[in-house]
Image: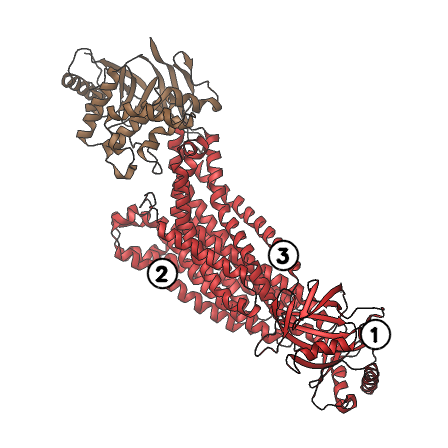
Amino acid sequence: MAILEVRNLKKVYTTRLGGNKVQALSNVTFSVEDGEFVAIMGESGSGKTTLLNILASIDKPTSGEVLLDGKNCTQINEKEISAFRRDNLGFVFQDFNLLDTFSIRDSIFLPLVLSGKGPEYMEQKLAPIAARLGITEILEKYPYEVSGGQKQRAAVARALITEPRLILADEPTGALDSNAADSLMKLFCGINDDGQTILMVTHSLRAASSARRVLFIKDGEVFHQIYKANMTSEEMFAKISETLTVLATGGVYNG
Amino acid sequence: MDSRFAGKLAFNNIKMNSKFYLPYILASTGIIAMFYIVTYLATNRGLQDMKGSEYISFVMLLGSVVIGVFAVIFLFYINSFLMKRRSREIGLYNILGMEKKHIGKILFMENLITSIASIASGLVTGILFSKLAFMLVRKVMGFDTPIVFTVSVQGILASIILFGVLFLLILLKNQMKIHLSQPIELLNDTSAGEREPKSKKVLAAIGAACIGAGYYIAITIQDPLEALLWFFIAVLLVIAGTYLLFTVISIEVLKALKKNKTYYYKPQHFTAVSGMLYRMKQNAVGMANICILSTMVLVMVSTTVCLQVGIRDVVQSIVPQDAVMTICDNDGSSALSDKELDKCTQVFLKSAEKSGVYTENLHSMSYVMTEAVKTGRGAYKFKLASNGLPSHVFLMMPARIYERITGEKVSLNDDQIITAGARLPGEVSFNGLTFQNVKDSNVKVPTDSGTIAAATHVIVFADDDVMNSVIKKAGGAKGIVGTYFTAAFDTDADAGKIDSIMDNSEASAYDAGHSNYSMSITVRSELESGFYGLTGGFLFLGIFLGLVFTFAAGLIIYYKQISEGYYDQGKYEIMQKVGMSMSEIKRSVRTQTLLVFFAPLAVAGIHMAAAFNMIQKMLLIFGISNVSLFAECSLITFLAFAAIYAFIYAMTSREYYKIVR
């Protein structure tokens, strides 16, 4: 069953001083099945971030629709959208987006506090997730006291704690060193194995090669897709690399 | 890099950062203008023809010192804020290949532009408004204004020198900062240091102790002269306590709130408490500054307004009519008899006639003046004040004299008295002799203009015998100033003519058997202008400095709002992504900013309430004993200031929302 369906998405930005129109997305259509781990790849300016912002209901498309569990999220009104986002989507960002004012524990609690949950319930929820992500030791620390990898794991915990339908990750390894990036990807694979649906935007080959499926975006359109199927990560890596080369040289893919 | 290019860059920088620089230039302009106006008034010849002008000059000189010192602290504070905001940009210049020499040159040009602009516009504004200020001073002192427009060369020179040197020092400080720091430090300066504040229990206790001690002194002090001495100590204690209150005590409180889980993990408290804990650390000094400035404004304005309004009553009580002649028999210890009183009145009328003064509504009377110290509630002991200010003065007269001046018949028992002047309780005792206070009269009894006591009471005894026995009990002349004869009257004659009555009368003509006399004539208009020179000067300065400090507080609030706006900008984006709706964010921001901005005002209000008793006692030095008048002045001042404060808050928070959105 498709958990997320994106149909004919189009986004045109108009520059402030009138005339100039920039087409970020021209026609994007794809769907994500329940329990999938999908990566979206593309060069800078290909429209990845615009796409993710629309999926996150932070931005509105010019035309087209986004269905989450069959519900059109571009139609949700302003009042409900925050609660909708909180209950259905989990976010992991490139720059972690942890607030300096909160300890790691409070950062993870934030979405639950906003939904009005009590302290006992939150503790109960947190314990297994923290153990799983290996951050139990640092819960009392503040973002400036922990490493980048730990910050990102805390952000993942924050995304997981609401048990969202879909996790949206925007360049999650972008600010991490290669070791931390690898272990984060292992973690993503692990939670995906547990049944969590993940949609990740990246331009890191290594990160994308962990995904079960990779979509390529070019000039605002879905250009191509690769399924991992039974390939190893190394084979997947090679395949993605090949595709990117074709994309970059502008040749017509014919494999 | 040639100077023209540096100048161009500098000019562009100021234009690009106008959000920061414009208020800075405006603030400097304002302070320079105020400084010029005050020095102008201190040196102005147009004021010197007025009575009491020496007070005005002195008070204004004091004012120029206060503004000067304040300008130094304040402009340095604002500058360090500006530099912090811009250090990233400067670091970038450095990394992009500009040598420190070049950056120094640009900064020099920037400072040159802002300094010249501030001094020039400050002087122009000052000169334009000095005339208005001049008219205001004359108005509060009750004079018309001659149509002349003068410029004070001394004022201009003093302003240019003081602020020129000040801006030069600021420039040097900025240059030092550039030369001593590494580009990477500059790049990260703006976002440096985001740590949860540590709790400092000892300091918090010291802060609480400071405020407690200051309040204790202010609330318990009784003696006016002691109040004057201790006032500065109390002020220093409370200032120190206020800084500690905002820097450490508030953090302790917030931490305690955070520990309470069921309270803390509520959507409406969660972000507010943790946000404030951080804001506190960043803004504590700013908040303490605002609080102290606000307190100063409140205290100065309410006190000086009360002084100006209340001094009328003081003049009234000393000279109830247009003029009064006072003769004191320093050896006397009983009131003049009716016969003697009539004789003295006749002698006075004859002298007045000789001077060409026509008197109306003449009220002549006699009383014995005593000085006393308070030993308990309603209990007094006669004693001459050895130095300084007598705390209580009693004007004692028998009922017959009271009847003579009021025309009303009284019948008192031996242990009953009528009182007037400063309020006394129902039971009053002198050196152990107790009387029932049966009536508060509003009779006006003129006193010697040289005698201003903390409280002046009029006591009417049943007859001469009772009164004499009270005086006798005091043990001879101890605490007895003497027997007074006073003649109060209304007249159209001018002060010179009235004064000449003294020359036309022989003291011996009033003789009642003694030889140690002193004689004086007090003309109300002269006394008034002397007093108004002082109180009017204080009032003007109080309101003037009040404006300066309000202005400064407003500017600090403005910069705080803007810097917080930039600081919070990223935070809201994150919170929105995590699932906080815009309205939730707005609500949380509103509670936070309201608390952060109105806490200083609330604390200032509490400080003011605590200072009430002490200031009221100090006002007694000027003879103002009207407590409800001071309470009214305080309340009105507080409400007016709160309104201005709320207005500043509303205006600046618009800037904040503009940035955050």
The local secondary structure at tag 1 comes to: helix
Horizontal relation, residue B492 to residue B50: left or right = right
B511 to B468, vertically: above or below: below
State which mark lies toward you, 2 or 1.
1
Tell me what hue chain B is rendered in: red
Write down the residue under mark 3. B631
| Alpha carbon distance from label 1 to label 3 | 36 Å
The hue of chain A in the figure is brown
The spot of residue B393 in percent (x, y) is 66, 73
How many neighbours does mark 1 have within 10 angstroms: few (below 14), some (14-19), or many (20 or more)? some
Residue A87, picture quadrant? top left
**The disc labelled 1 sits on which kind of residue?**
Arg
Front-most of residues B594 and A197: B594
| Residue assigned mark 1 | B404
The type of residue carrying mark 3 is: Ala
Secondary structure found at label 2: helix
Chain designation of label 2: B
Horizontal side, residue B56 vs residue B293: left or right: right
Q: Are marks 2 and 3 on the same chain?
A: yes
| The N terminus of chain B: image quadrant | bottom left
Instruction: Please state the horizontal and vertical placement of residue B625, each as a whole percent of the image.
Output: 65, 65
Along the viewing direction, whichever of B187 and B286 lies nearer the viewer = B286
1 vs 3, front mark: 1
Label 2 vs label 3, nearer the camera: 3
Residue B330 shown left or right of residue B122 in the figure: right
Task: Identify which residue, B423 or B624, lies in the foreground.
Answer: B423
Q: Which residue is mark 2?
A: B171
